[in-house]
Amino acid sequence: MMEMNKEVVMERFIRYVTFDTQSNDENSSCPSTPGQVVLAQYVAKELGKIGLEEIAVDNNGYVTATLPANGRPQGSVIGFISHMDTSPDMNGTPVKPRLVKEYDGKDIVLNKEKSIVLSPQDFPELTAYIGQDLLVTDGITLLGSDDKAGMCAIVSAMEYLLAHPEIQHGKVRIGFTPDEEIGRSADLFDVPAFGAEFAYTVDGGEIGAIEYENFNAANVMVRIQGRIVHPGTAKGKMINALSIAAEWQQMLPAGQRPEYTEGYEGFFHVNKLSGSVESAVISLLVRDHDLVSYEKRKSFLQVMADTFNAKYGPETIQLEIKDLYYNMREKIQPVMFIIDLARDAMEAVGVVPKTKPIRGGTDGARLSFMGLPCPNLFTGGHNFHGKYEFLPVLSLIKSAETVVEIIRRVGIR
Ligand SMILES: [Zn+2]
């Protein structure tokens, strides 16, 4: 039976979240914020202390290290990856985590002064953790379990394996990336240098989560050219770009929006609209797990553009469709044993695996298409990117144990 030291793991997590590593998409350098470099260097030092090898922090702030094989005939080299940045959506400093001991099932007052309460009425999933210790925020910042819980689970697993040489294993690579929250963490990830046959991101939510399906995703800009004329003499001459924008949105399938969809249901999502009579721009997201229906959605938009151009004149609508990422399922399917491996490992440490399609993307999706199949494992955190974020300590421990158990099982087939 594995015995992770709960105090050590928790202390490590609390240490990581005190680093301000909020990323910033307005800065094009990598990492986008200096705080991430500070954490990268800090964790690199820690990895050295616990005894990992080949520790490197590259010029872009990516941290990699190796846990060498210890006696097991070399099988697959596997990797574990998490990201160091926190979301720009919510204040990320100073994070002051608080430990709620043996949660009693009632409201948790996060901030008395501001009357911010984490309540099971709003978040019924809390009741699954009655009796457990929870890490919560002070109501002012996010907690940062996305993804410092992942970092913590990986480092704690490495520490555990180095302290338990009786557990034989092959070579393991670990990687910590910057700027995942702004969609850039895979950009400069050196897959060949990482040198793993497959890897897992440890960046998921509640205990047991294992994810290997995500959206196919395109971002679309709809540029609308109107014609401004003095309103007093506009009859038959003015083309109001704002009216066309409204008409455009009305023509999108009404039920296929984020607020009406779940599971494997795709959507169109207008997330920004700006303009005047003369011109307007609509920013629109297209998301679908199924590649065929994803392509259909994009051609539907093209047909809409053609229809509008026939009605209002050529070049009234200009469409710009940019594919962002694809469903990693296609790349995982040929190596499904890595999903089974993770499921078996979870069960071995007493966790019930839960497979769910991701309604978004992950670093792993892009890495999978870069040649590193990379499903996503739970960290244990809930309510990411906000002040109601919380992390059950036991879930974090189980995340670290899952990492250990996967490593132990690789090659025993
Ligand atoms: Zn994350």
Image (tube, rainbow, N blue to C red):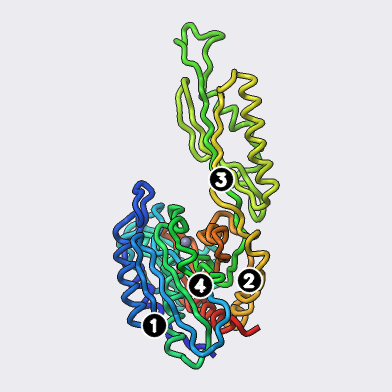
Which numbered disc flags the more N-terminal residue, 4 or 1? Answer: 1
Q: Which mark is residue 339?
A: 2
Q: For numbered disc 2, what is the local secondary structure?
A: helix
Q: Nearer the viewer, residue 402 or 333?
A: 333
- Left or right: residue 302 versus residue 400 is right
Which numbered disc flags the more N-terminal residue, 3 or 2? Answer: 3
| Real-space Cα separation, disc 4 to disc 1, in angstroms | 26 Å
Residue at the spot of label 3 = 323
**Which residue reaches farthest bottom?**
166
* Cβ atoms at labels 2 and 4 below 8 Å apart: no
Which-is-in-front pick, marks 4 and 1? Answer: 4
- Left or right: residue 28 versus residue 329 is left
- Left or right: residue 267 versus residue 201 is right
- Left or right: residue 311 versus residue 404 is right
Residue type beneath disc 1: Glu
| Real-space Cα separation, disc 2 to disc 1, in angstroms | 30 Å
Q: Which mark is residue 79?
A: 4
User: Pointer 4: residues within 10 angstroms few (<14), some, or many (20+)?
Assistant: many
User: Pointer 1: residues within 10 angstroms few (<14), some, or many (20+)?
Assistant: few
Residue at 43 percent of width and 58 percent of height? 188
Residue 134: x and y in percent read 44, 73
Q: Nearer the viewer, residue 233 or 172?
A: 172
User: Pointer 2: residues within 10 angstroms few (<14), some, or many (20+)?
Assistant: many
Residue type beneath disc 3: Asp
Q: Nearer the viewer, residue 278 or 298?
A: 298
